Amino acid sequence: MATTTATITLSSTDLLSDELALTTTATLTTAGTATGVTQASGLSRKTTSAASAAAIQANVLYRAGDYTANGANKVYIKNTSSVVAEYYTVHVDQEQIGRLYAGDWMLMPWSAVSGTKQVFTVTFASTWVAGETWTFDGITMTCPSATVADLAAEVHTLNYPNWTTTYGGSGAAVVFTARYASDATEVVYATADATIVSANPGTAAISAAAVGSASESDITIRPSVHTAMTYETMLIHE
Amino acid sequence: MATTTAAVTLTSDLLSDAMSVTASTTCMKAGTTADGLDQLEYAVVEIATGDEYDLICSTPTASKASKLYVKNHSIDETYFVAITQNAQAIGRLYGGDWMFIPADFHDAAGDIAITSNGGTNKIEYALFHEGTALTAT
């Protein structure tokens, strides 16, 4: 079992009448157990910048949908700047946690509560001919044969930037699931959102679509200035 | 000015190579590198399972550089306290866990709230801040 520890030392010789010297170490375990956490994102470092102050955008550090909800996840963030005016404002979903000023760091537990993901089913039917195509999410499936089950299987082999697929191993239907939870106001996907290039009457009907709901605890940080600022972060998770 | 230092060390053998991350910061007031945070609320409380409580009873001056340290002293690994802000789930501190975050207290909805789960959790917390909006009697 891996052992991961987090030690904090808070010290001051002149804040109180007596010296403040607080040190504690936590051995990080999975939720409700004595088993050590087993996964970490690794320490990463990124510089943020924008063309102008008006163009400053928040950076998504971690998406809740990628991690175990209500686990004993821990997020470490450090602002490496040494300039007073350069701070990052940390949000969980839309709640502002606080500002990490120059040199500041934080270690925060993270619930990673996600929303739900959109889902739809595409079903291939009628006459298709090898070489014809179906394009969705920027990815084109080229028909391998005239058998619709082969089309579905081929669709499932491809990698979509915003969707994952589920295929039962037979049949003509593939279920698409969004990679990230999104707000319920999103449009339900329909047949017309994909493009068929076919001289034949082949169809690829999108049905059984369901909208999702917004993620509830993505972590974002927004830099205070548009000039280059750098942060470090690591996620220790289940 | 007071000088308060917060240092962290994260170590792990999770990865192929040993990980050891260290960081240290001197807790300053907002927008300065010359004037340290000079006020502190420090307490230990026992919180019974059930209701949600605001951890900080007064309102520290908003949008400053306050830092909040919280530790759950429970020794039962199934016990935890849920940390929320304005009903937004932040995370869970299981027995032995601690957290150290910038606490903005940007408005009345920015209070950090805590709910005990599993049983009575003993919580230690320290808020380093720049001032408090006192309520007149």
Image: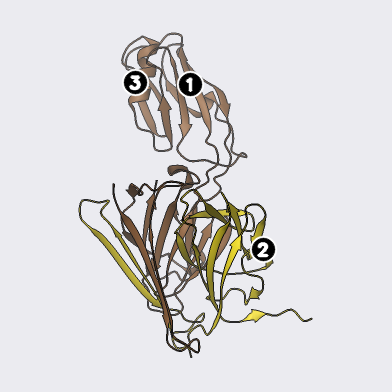
Chain colours: A brown, B yellow
Look at label 2 and name its amino acid.
Ala
Rendered position, A70 above or below B23: above
Q: Which residue is found at the position 61% from the left and 65% from the top?
A: B55
Which disc number belongs to residue A154? 3
Give the CA separation, mark 3 to mark 1: 13 Å
Same-subunit check for callouts 1 and 2: no
Rendered position, A229 above or below B5: above
Look at label 3 and name its amino acid.
Glu
Query: In the rendered image, which residue does mark 1 sit on?
Result: A122
Expressed as whole percent of the image width and height from the top left, the position of residue B134 reads: 70, 80
Outermost residue, left side: B17
Q: Return the chain for callout 3.
A: A
Q: Return the chain for callout 1.
A: A
Q: Return the chain for callout 2.
A: B
Rendered position, B40 above or below A32: below
Expressed as whole percent of the image width and height from the top left, the position of residue A87 reads: 46, 72
Q: Are marks 3 and 1 in contact (CB under 8 Å)?
A: no
Look at label 1 and name its amino acid.
Val
On the question of residue A58 being in view, the answer is no
Outermost residue, right side: B137
Q: Which residue is found at the position 34% from the left and 71% from the top?
A: B23
For disc 1, the neighbor class at 10 Å (few under 14, some 14 to 19, many from 20) is many
Answer with left or right where residue B109 lies relative to residue A150.
Answer: right
Q: Secondary structure at mark 3?
A: helix
Q: Secondary structure at mark 2?
A: helix
Q: Nearer the viewer, mark 1 or mark 2?
A: 2
Answer with left or right where residue A184 lies relative to residue A110.
Answer: right
Q: Secondary structure at mark 1?
A: strand
Expressed as whole percent of the image width and height from the top left, the position of residue B26 reads: 41, 80
Which disc number belongs to residue B109? 2
Give the CA separation, mark 3 to mark 2: 51 Å
